[in-house]
Image (spheres, grey):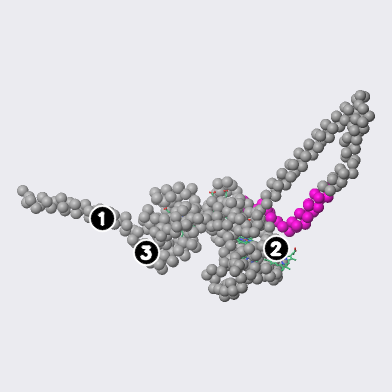
Amino acid sequence: MLPKQAVKRIPLSFVLLISLLLTLAVQKSFAQASEVPTDAETIAAGEKLFTQNCKVCHNVQTKLIGPALAGVYDRRELPWIYAFVKNSTKLIESGDEQAVAVFNENNQIQMTAFDFFSDEEILSIVAYIKDQTDNAPVAEAAPAATAAATPAGQEELPSSYLNAIIIGAAVILVLLLVVLFMIVSTLSKYLRQRDDLSEEDREFVETRNPMAIIRSKAFIGIVVAVVTAVVAKGTIDALYSIGVQQGYAPKQPIAYSHKIHAGDYQIDCNYCHTGVTKSKNANIPSPNICLNCHNSITKGTNTGTVEIDKIFAAVENNKPIEWVRVHNLPDLAYFNHSQHVAVGKIACQTCHGPIEEMEVVRQYANLTMGWCVNCHRDTELNTKGNGYYDRLVELHEQESDQPFTVEDNGGLECAKCHY
Ligand code: HEC
Ligand code: HEC
Ligand code: HEC
Ligand code: HEC
Ligand code: HEC
Ligand code: HEC
């Protein structure tokens, strides 16, 4: 027979055992998260690697080409992540259940292999992902595209629409005239054939003869005036639009779509237009940049393999893809992208329109001197955090209570834009 105390102790030790097991189990699921470093240095190193290698296809919070990576360290073992990042294809082909599942969930798009990374490097990326998961930035997913879609100082007139209305109205007027003309001539003919008309009425009918109206001086005067006006307007329009290519949207050698890449998949403009923050020219990407993804994405939803194969052909034959240039200022003008994008912080869309919605790029602004100059008159300089401007702003504020615009900084001087 057991002593009374022992009876009491059994349930107690039982409870202890259970709670120990529970703690262990809970600890196990947290064990991995606690293995991920949280020091600022590792996170910064991871951020750099992530930006350079992963950002084109992954966001932490939202799905891009690959899945959102928030919390991967909870749903996958670290060694699995190392293996997957180094060579996902190998893992998928080995039949690993999780790898096959995530591959199928993402339309079987193959991830680039990063076999040159060490485990530590991948761990630092995971550290960055964990940091971003725990401290999710509030407005992270807001696409830059929505920033500014209206061009500064310029409203696009729906001129084709207006023209259609004017032409339509003209056609209706002409038809009306013809009908009226026919009615009048039938009626006069009928009246003239009648014998019972008084002398006065007969005279009236004769003068209302449509042919007489057409021959009248007033009518000829009006016609001449209208024709002159139309011809003059056409000539002036044509003269003003010499060299202006607004709306120009040439067919490109490969049906490359900004809507798919910059819109649907939110690939950063800088990823392809590498010069845009650093130099005068934005640059058009070489086929190698396309291959970063298209080595594994060999089929498109709309065009199958036809268009993407042209990238491979260009690389194999060592021939550049002959993109047709859309925007082109005359040689006499100097325009610098980094000045506007990096220093002025102007969104691409302000000058290029909603590129991320365009299947084929078209020239959005008219690129005339007036367009440049108007924006320089209206736009306030972005002087914040730019020590170079501190003294200038101070001087400007002593003289004027108006905002400090590009114009005030000499942005209308001929030599700034002309060589
Ligand atoms: C070319 C686009 C691309 C690049 C670049 C890329 N990934 Fe991926 N990644 C994917 C796709 C697509 C998947 C989904 C799995 C698949 O389809 O193979 C994926 C899946 C993953 C997964 C598994 C996610 C899960 O939920 O299991 C991890 C982890 C991962 N990527 C990490 C990285 C890291 C780290 C980098 C940078 C070093 C990177 N990826 C670069 C496209 C990419
Ligand atoms: C995946 C690569 C890629 C991305 C991302 C990309 N572009 Fe492009 N872009 C190209 C290619 C290739 C061309 C040349 C073919 C064409 O005009 O469609 C081009 C052409 C252009 C042109 C016309 C150039 C000319 O000939 O005058 C503009 C403007 C432009 N891109 C702006 C943007 C903006 C703004 C973004 C971001 C919202 C962006 N691009 C994102 C690849 C890219
Ligand atoms: C960061 C990854 C990435 C880069 C870089 C990239 N693409 Fe793509 N591209 C994609 C994705 C994702 C798709 C969509 C595949 C699909 O339709 O499922 C795609 C689709 C396409 C298609 C087929 C569209 C269709 O629907 O049929 C063409 C053509 C194409 N890209 C051309 C290019 C060219 C040219 C470049 C280089 C200037 C380029 N891509 C660079 C990711 C990329
Ligand atoms: C202030 C207006 C303005 C802004 C902002 C701007 N561009 Fe441009 N972009 C132009 C003009 C003007 C040209 C024509 C340049 C020329 O012909 O010398 C051009 C030309 C281009 C070209 C053709 C190739 C080249 O380098 O000439 C590309 C690509 C391009 N821009 C991409 C971009 C991207 C991407 C951004 C945003 C990161 C951007 N642009 C922001 C005005 C602008
Ligand atoms: C959307 C408004 C906008 C348009 C359009 C624009 N610019 Fe600018 N530009 C700016 C701003 C803002 C700055 C000042 C950037 C800075 O230095 O902070 C600037 C600066 C400049 C400068 C340097 C001026 C200086 O004082 O050093 C030059 C040169 C220039 N632009 C040329 C052009 C040309 C050429 C065009 C037309 C093809 C053009 N810009 C169209 C906004 C614009
Ligand atoms: C903010 C930039 C900017 C400034 C400042 C500027 N221009 Fe221009 N100018 C341009 C651009 C861009 C063009 C080309 C426009 C076009 O092709 O329609 C141009 C075209 C011209 C042309 C026409 C050339 C031709 O072939 O049609 C003349 C002339 C000219 N500029 C003179 C001047 C003079 C004089 C000044 C000083 C009072 C001046 N510009 C200041 C940007 C500028």
Percent of width and height locating residue 43? 41, 65
Q: Residue at x 87, y 44 (%)?
A: 218
| Residue linked to disc 1 | 23
Determine the CA span between mark 2 and mark 3: 54 Å
Does any atom of ligand 6 lie closer than 8 Å to the CB of label 2?
Answer: yes
Whether the residues at callouts 2 and 3 have beta carbons within 8 Å, the answer is no
Snapshot quadrant of residue 82:
bottom left
Q: Secondary structure at mark 3?
A: loop
Percent of width and height locating residue 323? 65, 57
Q: Secondary structure at mark 1?
A: helix
| Residue linked to disc 2 | 369
Kindly identify the amino acid type of the residue bearing the numbered disc 2. Met
Q: Which residues are magenta?
A: 227-255
Q: Nearer the viewer, mark 1 or mark 2?
A: 2
Disc number placed over residue 360 in the picture, else none: none
Determine the CA span between mark 1 and mark 2: 72 Å
